[in-house]
Amino acid sequence: MDKEILWIDLAKIPEGVSLEKFNEDFDKLGVWSQQAVDSLLESYNTKEIKMEKYYTPELSELHIGFEVEKAVYISTEPYYPSPSVLDSWEKVTINHPIMMSICSWGTSEFRVKYLDRQDIEECGFTFLKKDWGRDVYEKPVYKTGKLTLYLEKTYVILLCKDGEYDVSLFRGNVKNKMEFKKLLKMLWV
């Protein structure tokens, strides 16, 4: 029995998916049809690459007053030493240089939350819409102006509109709430 010839539009295979990966995924479907090819390509294009919500901070990011979350463990047995189980995360503010070096050891004991909608709204911005994969926020400033902020993962674009002109105040990566607050302070916003 001859198999029909299937057409694969290579331009529809997203970056980061090799032909080998495509072939593996196609074989897993177990169906040999043009509809299966099109369906697989569509599934690649509708999958949103999700970023982790937290990361382990680097030493260069840390400073007195920096906020991190510390793992809190519970013991599984009443006597020491015993295996521990992660119970929760506790918010901690770095208040000593020794604590900065402990946080930077690269362990999973400490984590920092990436900048997100909640953090931006806490700084006085209002969420407007999602536009081309970016979150759009606004904040009124001065008497007639407004700030417009675009956030895509960690990339931030901050524009100020005064009258009829948009002025770019900042374009770059902002990983967390502390960096965002520092940026706003530097821009006198």
Image: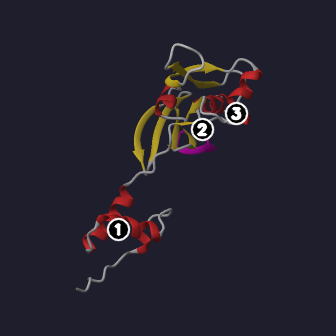
Q: Main secondary structure of the magenta part?
A: strand
- What residue sits right under mark 3 in the picture? 105
Q: Position of residue 106 (x, y in %)?
A: 66, 36
At label 2, the amino acid type is Lys
At label 1, the amino acid type is Phe
Q: Give the number of the disc on residue 169.
A: none
> Quadrant location of the C terminus?
top right
As drawn, 54 above or below 49: above
Q: Position of residue 27 (x, y in %)?
A: 34, 68
Circle 1: element type: helix
User: From this viewpoint, which residue is outermost toward the bottom?
Assistant: 2
At label 3, the amino acid type is Trp
Which badge, 2 or 1, is on the more N-terminal residue? 1
Query: Camera-side residue: 149 or 103?
Result: 103
- Which of discs 2 and 1 lies nearer the camera? The answer is 1
As drawn, 188 above or below 156: above
> Quadrant location of the N terminus?
bottom left
Q: Give the number of the disc on residue 26.
A: 1
Q: Position of residue 11 (x, y in %)?
A: 43, 72
Residue drawn at x 73%, y 34% as measured from the top left = 59
Q: Residue 168 lies in magenta, yes or no?
A: yes
- Give the magenta range: 162-174
Q: How crowded is the residue under tag 2: few (<14 C-alpha within 10 Å), some, or many (20+)?
A: many
Query: Camera-side residue: 19 or 43?
Result: 19
Query: Camera-side residue: 52 or 140?
Result: 52
